[in-house]
Amino acid sequence: MILLPFGALTVFREKINRPLKQEFIILIMGPLVQLISVALYLQINYDQFILNYSNLILMFNLLPIYPLDGSKLLNIILNKITNFKRSHLLTIYISLLTIAFLLLKVKFNLLLLLILFFIAVKVIDEYRNHNSLFNKFLWERYTNNFAFIKRKVIKGKEVTKMKRDYKHIFYSGGKYITEREILRKRFDFTRKM
C-alpha cells in the first residue's frame, strides 16, 4: 500500500491476464465498501461534512485517470472493445486529457493542482513503461497455461493484436500457428540465432 496526499493506493501483484470479469468484481469492491461504510457511519452519526467529503473522494476516484478506479473501469471497457496494447495506450491518453481538462476548467486550488501534478507524473511513468507492460502481458501468456474459452484468429503474426480473455490462433503463409508457437519464437532465448 502506498500512502498518497489524497488517500492510498493498493498495489496488487496480480496477473495482467486474469479474466476481465474477475478484475471488474475486484474493482467495484473499493467504491462499494466506501459507500457501505459511509452509509453505516451516517446511521450512527449524520454529518453533512463527512457525506460531502466521502462523495467528493468517490467521484474523484471514479475519474478516468490512471491509477484511479475510473481508469481501471475504462481499461476494462476498452479491453472488451480492442486489443490489450491499444486499450492501455487509450487509457493513458484519456488520463492525460482528463487531467488537462480539469486543469483548464476547475477553479484554481493548490491542493488539487498538487494532486493532479502527482497523478500526471504517474501517468507519464505508466506511458514510459507501456512496452514493458505489454511484454509482461505476452510473457504471462507464454509462461502460464490460461484456459480462455473465447478464440480469436489473427491474420499475420502481429502479437500487438492480442486481446485479454482470448486464446489466439495466427493465420500466416496459408497455415495456422498457435499463440504458444508465436510466443515461443519471441521468448525462447535458448535457440540458436
Image: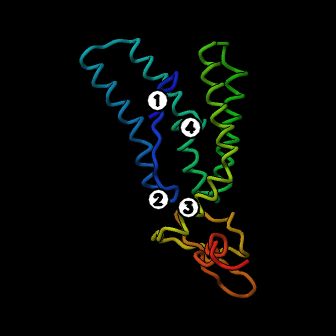
- Residue 78 percent location from the top left of the image: 61, 52
Q: Which residue is drawn at 62% across and 30% down?
A: 119
- Residue 122 percent location from the top left of the image: 62, 35
Mark found first going from the N terminus, 2 or 1: 1
Q: How far apart are marks 4 and 2 (CA)?
A: 19 Å
Does the residue at mark 4 contact the one at mark 2 (Cβ under 8 Å)? no
- Residue 86 percent location from the top left of the image: 68, 54
Q: Residue at x 70, y 21 (%)?
A: 105
Amino acid type at mark 3: Arg
Amino acid type at mark 1: Ala
Q: Which is more toward the observer, 65 or 144?
A: 144
Q: How far apart are marks 1 and 4 (CA)?
A: 11 Å
- Residue topped by disc 2: 19
Q: How far apart are marks 3 and 2 (CA)?
A: 7 Å
Mark found first going from the N terminus, 3 or 2: 2
- Residue topped by disc 1: 8
- Residue topped by disc 3: 164
**Residue 148, above or below 94:** below
Residue sitting at the far bottom: 174
Amino acid type at mark 2: Pro
Q: Residue at x 60, y 63 (%)?
A: 138
